[in-house]
Amino acid sequence: MNERKDKPRSDIDFKMMSFFFRIRDRFRNPGNLLEKVGIKKGQTLLDFGCGSGSYVIPAARMVGEKGRIYALDIHPLAIRTVEKKANKEGLTNIATILSDRDTGLPDESIDVVLLYDVIRSIKDKRALLKELHRVMKATGLLSILAEHIKVEDVLEIAEKGGLFSLRDQHGKLLNFEKGQHEQAE
């Protein structure tokens, strides 16, 4: 099987991206965006493609001590950056996962998946969505931020095959419910 694998950015590219995100986050509070997702205390959340952790820290505060955040990224620097931020903030409800796609999480274990400005760079989008569908609870939510990709393209990608259906939209933020099963294509 010739599966396409995603590759991490170079270290310098990651550091430049992280610097840009620090500046961006001062002007656009990531917590405000997360409020539109409806994250609640005690939930389990997966931030897929967490990068330098812009959404991980506010999400960890939102789910509280009884909640859990999984921060997954393909880049080792992303994982180290998130771990440093979590330690600095004294947050113990964050676990990191270094992976290109497979989460290693149990079936139906996640309440909310964040896929923020990531889907455009994933080569095998279908395989990613199947993995996210697998780990999401039946009442789970997939939240996609459509930056650097058209909203219409995100809708087409996410709804193809019946894995997900749009629940609500806030500009470029699209929240999807889990579909029951994949339809024949």
Image: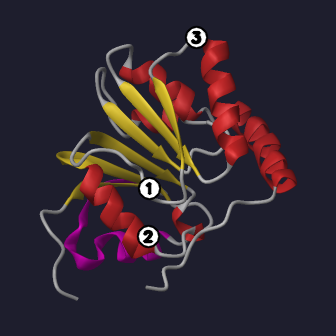
Q: Residue at x 31, y 20 (%)?
A: 41
Q: Earlier in the sequence, mark 3 or mark 1?
A: 3
In what element is the residue under mark 1? strand
Q: Which of marks 3 and 1 is in front?
A: 3
Contact, CB < 8 Å: mark 2 with mark 3?
no
Contact, CB < 8 Å: mark 1 with mark 2?
yes
For the residues labelled 3 and 1, the Cα–Cα distance comes to 28 Å
Q: What residue type is labelled 3?
A: Gly
Question: In the image, residue 18 lies at what x, y percent?
Answer: 76, 43
Question: In the image, residue 36 lies at what x, y percent?
Answer: 39, 39
In what element is the residue under mark 3? loop
Contact, CB < 8 Å: mark 3 with mark 1?
no
Residue on which the image places disc 3: 90
For the residues labelled 2 and 3, the Cα–Cα distance comes to 35 Å
For this orientation, the residue located farthest to the front is 1
Q: Evaluate whether residue 91 shows in this view.
A: yes
Name the foreground residue: 173 vs 19: 19
Question: In the image, residue 158 lies at what x, y percent?
Answer: 35, 69
Q: Is residue 70 left or right of residue 88?
A: left
Question: In the image, residue 88 lies at what x, y percent?
Answer: 67, 14
In what element is the residue under mark 2? helix
For the residues labelled 1 and 2, the Cα–Cα distance comes to 8 Å
Q: Evaluate whether residue 167 shows in this view.
A: no
Q: What residue type is labelled 1?
A: Ile
Packing grade of label 1 (10 A; few <14, some 14-19, many >=20) is: many
Residue on which the image places disc 2: 154
Q: Give the range drawn in magenta.
A: 151-170
Q: Which residue is drawn at 57% across and 35% down?
A: 30
Residue on which the image places disc 1: 144
Depicted 119 relative to depicted 56: above or below = below
